[in-house]
Image (spheres, grey):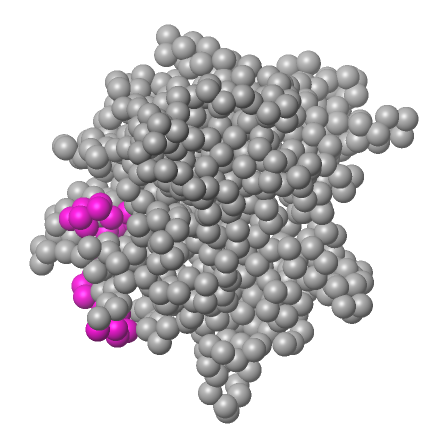
Amino acid sequence: MASNQLLALPVLALAVLWPKKTVDATDFQRENAMPKGNIKSFDLKSRMTLPYGPDLYGSEVPQSPDDQPYRGYGPGMGASETIEYDPLNHFLYSMSDQGFILVADYADPSSPKISDYSFKTESNKLGSMSICPDQGVMLLSLSKAGRIDVYDLVSRDDPKVPTLQKSVDCGPNAKNVLASKDCSVAAIANTNAGEGLEQGSVTILQDVLSDAPKRTTIPLDYNEWDDAYLLRRGLNMPMTKNALEYWDDYSHLADDLDFSELRDNYKSSIFLEPENLAWGPDEMELLVNMQENNGLLRINMTDLSPVAVAGYGMKDHSFVPVDINANDGDCKLKTYPSLFAMRNPDQIASLKYNDKNYVITANEDGGKEYGDWEEAIKSNDLFQGPNFKLQNVIVPKFIFDENNTSAGHSALFNDDCQDTTADEEELCLRKVEFSVGSNSIDFESDPKNPIFYRMVLFGGRGWSIYELPENPRNQLKLVFDSGDAMEREGCSNFPWSHNALMDEELAPVTGPNNTFVKFLEADGDLDMIADVMEKNDPEEKGCLDQGDGTPGSCPLSQMVDKRSGKDGAGVENVIMGEACGRLVTAMATEKSSIGMLFDITDITTPELLHVFHLSPAARDSSFGLAYNAGEIGEIDPESGVFLSAKESPSGKAGILWAGALSGTVSWWEFDCKEEEEGSSSTKQQSGEQPVSAAAASFRESSWATMLLACTFGMSMLMLSQL
């Protein structure tokens, strides 16, 4: 299938807004859209690498950003965890994993350059970044320090290295920060770090740029929000009070765990995890995404009170095909009875479309850890022949029959499973990650004998759209889910990258640019060094030929299916804006770098416009080889920014993609067909243009997604009656 072929996505769909307010298209009216097909092309225009950090080779010759290969922090060092763009001065800001802020000059986006204004912050660990171009400041969250640092931005008229203006305490584990448009308010997500009694909360800083900001901490369990309420609202609770009793007293881990202090001081909010934030339209609400809980919290910004929580629902893989077989090296999507998946979105965004409010989720993965306890468990550890790993847990026979392990729905996941040679479709699935949280086990009926009622995966492998009800106490309304589209279309266009894996553990161990290993050696991180060495050793998990005939880590084409048993085509962010008079959204798979562009102008008939790869060089070259050759693209594309034609320095709308681990940023630009301004053809109601055969075929193949939406709606109705 050609990558630029138009395909219609199923069910209802909406656009997304990158949660850090880089576009003004928060209020879209369909009647003002340009005709379908007005986007002529979407092409890569430039790519740059952002090297940074001290010289790790001890050379006496000072290094510069133009040095190739760079002797500082190279592949795997997280140069671009988050990017922001200042449309007033055309500088890009890239937040690194080691406390550096890299500043790139995008006055000419076809030839961007590292500026002289990059700097090292006072912290070695940053949480996130949010900028306020009109006020000329950036806000950085310092996770461990529990504060926000405010720096000035670089001015085109008087450029200089940003300096620290002030620091504001904002509570422990300050993960993500989001500034309001006028920078008068900053919201911060505070998480529990997997130990102690710290509650998941949101900190609101009012008058944040003043000499005396007002700080308000909002615990996520609010007043009467106990376990029972949160479960009724559809949230996944990794632990509840009853679950703690089970694990502490009755489980196979009882002798190794001691949750006595936690049980004595239990609050639900200890296991509520705020991940990312987005403003609702007009910034009257703050939307708090809780990734591990598979749910959303809405906060009223008028009185700073939580209003309600709601779950994102489950993906039913008895209807929606999925590839969870990491052993066949192929993209075979299948359905499985009693198998579900939490969506576990990372980034969320909000949009007002035709006067209705929506939230869009980028569905990645999840899994909570607390001390020595983990929510995730491998399927073959859970189902061990005739034995079920979780002691004293009741399992229905249709899922697991201890007297006939090949009969239940868990048969393929059992450690005793034998691959059926006569039927290639029935291969064993021994190392798929399952959840043992509340979405799979009922701990509330009887903590002595909980009930395991379904197998649950982490991550929705795609994206979803929900209508936000006017009454926030009503459940979210699922209006679109991408179903199996991300896996299916990614494989159709780039089978060599299907559910593949390229991350920091595949960084090179020999020079040039084995800087990640050198950094780990200096930091004393022996476990990570062992992982990197293993993935570079062909006798372990490496390849005999990394792309140049020498042994090393594997190219993407040799890593197909490695993420199938975990999160597959997980998506970490969704980017949205208006291009050529059409509303578009784009996203990329986190570990395999497959990008997709959608036209979502017509909510009920969105179209897949383009499937592309952010790092083609990684197909046949290892991480290190492609990096050293200057050909690496975006590896781990966690962040992106949409620039409208008004914001773009080229005058054309486009998208900036950042590779967190490759330290690269690419600029992709839209080209529009010519249209007479104000002509009658510039406004078109949906349904006026015929749908292509390919689009019709794509829509027909998505019946499972439509059924899923109906099932979700019925489930939410039933939950609301409890």
**549 w.r.t. 189: above or below:** below
Q: Residue furthest left?
A: 211
**Quadrant of the rendered structure where residue 703 is?**
top right
For the point 55% across and 45% down, the residue is 595
The quadrant of the image that shows the N terminus is top right
Q: Residue furthest bottom?
A: 60
| Residue 546 part of the magenta segment | no
For the point 72% across and 58% down, the residue is 620
| Residue 171 part of the magenta segment | yes
Query: From which residue to which does the magenta span run?
Result: 158-185
For the point 48% across and 83% down, the residue is 63
**78 w.r.t. 579: above or below:** below
**89 w.r.t. 360: above or below:** below
For the point 30% across and 24% down, the residue is 354
Q: Is residue 494 left or right of residue 253?
A: right
The number of callouts visible is 0
Q: Position of residue 294 (x, y in %)?
A: 44, 31
Residue 495 visible in image: yes
Q: Is residue 220 left or right of residue 632?
A: left
Q: Position of residue 257 (x, y in %)?
A: 51, 40
Q: Position of residue 67 (x, y in %)?
A: 52, 80
**Quadrant of the rendered structure where residue 472 is?**
top left
Viewer-side residue, 391 vs 49: 49
The quadrant of the image that shows the C terminus is top left
Q: Position of residue 404 (x, y in %)?
A: 79, 18
Viewer-side residue, 622 vs 700: 700
Residue 309 visible in image: no
